[in-house]
Image (cartoon, rainbow, N blue to C red):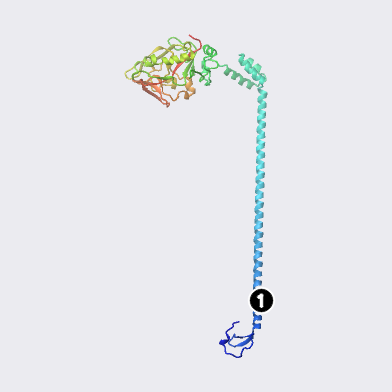
Amino acid sequence: MATKNISTYPVVETIKDADKVVLSKDGTVRLVEIGTVKADMRQEIRDAKGELQNELNSKTSATEAALDAERTARTNADTALAKRVDDEVEARTNANADLQESIDAEETARENADTNLQTQIDNRYTKTETDDLLDAKQDNLSESQLAATNSGLTSNDKTALDLLVKILNGTGPGFHSSIYRGKYLGDTYTDEQKQAIASGTFEDLFVGDYWTINGVNWRIADFDYYYNIGDRAFTKHHVIIVPDTTLYGAQMNSENTSSGGYTNSEMYTTNLDEARAAFDNAFGSSFIPSHRGMYSNATSSGGNPSGFTWRDMRVELMNEEQLYGHAIWGSANHNGYDTGTQKTQFKLFVFDQTKINIRELYWLANVSSSSGFARIGDNGLSNSGNASDVRGVRPFACLVGDSE
C-alpha cells in the first residue's frame, strides 16, 4: 500500500483527527484510520514470516537428512577400511609366525645334524685312537701295526689314516721339494736340522721354510739341486738357500763389457765376496761347501756366450733359468753356454711368484749383450743392463748338514 502527501490531492474533508490519513490506490482519495492500516500490515508481516519459517524448516530438514546420509556413508567406509587393515595385519602376523616357525625348525634340524655329525666323529676318532696314531708315528710303527692299533675304525678310515702317515713320514728331496710350507725355522741352524739335511731325509724341512739370522730371511728354495752334478760328482745332500732380499749393490764389471762371460766377470771373482761372508756368518763356512758347476767363460764379438767351463762355486748369482724357468734376455741364440748346470727353476719360485718380484732390481748371471748382463727390475720386469751399473746382489748357496 502506497501513501502520498495529502497536499497533492484535493481536500475533500478537513482532517480533524490525528488518527486518520489520506490514502489512494486507484486515484480515489479516502481517509483510513491508522489503526486499521497497522493491523493489516502486521497481518501481512506475520503471514510472510510464517511462509519464510516454513521454507526454512523445509530446507533445514533436507540439509540435516543429507548430512546424516553423508555421515552414515563415511562411517560405513571407515568401518570397512578398519576391517581391511585389521585383516591385513592379522594375515601378515600369521605369515610371520609361520616363517619364524619354519626358521626355528630349520635351525633345530641343523643343530641336530651338527650334533649327530659330532657324535659320529667322536665315536669314530676317540682320543685314545688319536693318541695311538701319534704314538705309531713317533715309534715308526709299520702300516699293519698302525691299522691294528685303530681296530675301531672303518676300512675307509684306516686307508685314509695310512695315507696320512705316509705323507707325514715322507722323506727325501723329491717329497720335500714338492710341498711349500713357509715355516719359520728359528734364528740358528740347529743340530737337528743339520742331521735332517746330512741324512737326506730332510725331516721337518720344506720349500719356503726360512731362518732369520743377522736380520736376513734365508729361505729354502730347493732340495739336492746339485746332487750328483759336476765333473767331480757332488754327493752331499743339501738345500738351496736364497735370501728374501738383496744383500747389497755391486757391478758386474767396472766397464760395460760381458767379455769372458760370468766366470770372468768382476762379480764372480771379487764382488761376491761380501755375500759369501754373509752366508758364512749365518750358517758357518764349513756348511757352505764348494762344488762344481758349469758357467759361461767366453763370448763372441756379438756378445753371445761362446763357451763354458767347470768352475768351483759356493755363493753365486742365480741365472734366468733358476729364477724364471727359462732364458729371456740371456743367451740370445740359446746355445746353452749360459745355462750350463743351472738348467731348472728353483721350486721356491715355482710355488711362490712373490719371491721373484721383491720390488728390488738385482743382477742375474746370464750374458745379455756385449756390454751387459740380465737382471730383473724392481717393478718385476725381466730386463738387462750395462755391466757397470750398480744393482742388487741376491745370490744362492748350497747348505749341507755335515761340515767339510
- Compare residues 76 and 29 and report the one nearer the observer: 29
Q: Position of residue 99 (x, y in %)?
A: 65, 40
Q: Quadrant of the N terminus?
A: bottom right
Q: Secondary structure at mark 1?
A: helix
Question: Who is closer to the viewer here, 308 or 252?
Answer: 252
Q: Residue at x 64, y 58 (%)?
A: 74
Residue occupying the point 61% across, 15% down: 138
Q: Is residue 13 left or right of residue 403?
A: right
Note whether residue 34 is visible. yes
The residue shown at (65%, 67%) is 60
Instruction: Work out whether residue 341 can be spotted.
Output: no
Q: Is residue 98 left or right of residue 302?
A: right
Q: Position of residue 328 (x, y in %)?
A: 40, 23
- Name the one closer to the observer, 138 or 49: 49
Image location of residue 144, percent across then percent down? 63, 15
For disc 1, the neighbor class at 10 Å (few under 14, some 14 to 19, many from 20) is: few
The percent coordinates of residue 359 (x first, y second) are 44, 25
Q: Find disc 1 in the rendering and name its residue.
A: 46
Q: Picture quarter containing residue 254?
A: top left
230 w.r.t. 326: above or below: above
Q: Is residue 90 above or below residue 126?
A: below
Does residue 131 appear to the left or right of 308 in the view shown? right
Total labels drawn: 1
Residue type at mark 1 is Arg
Most distant residue in the left direction:
301
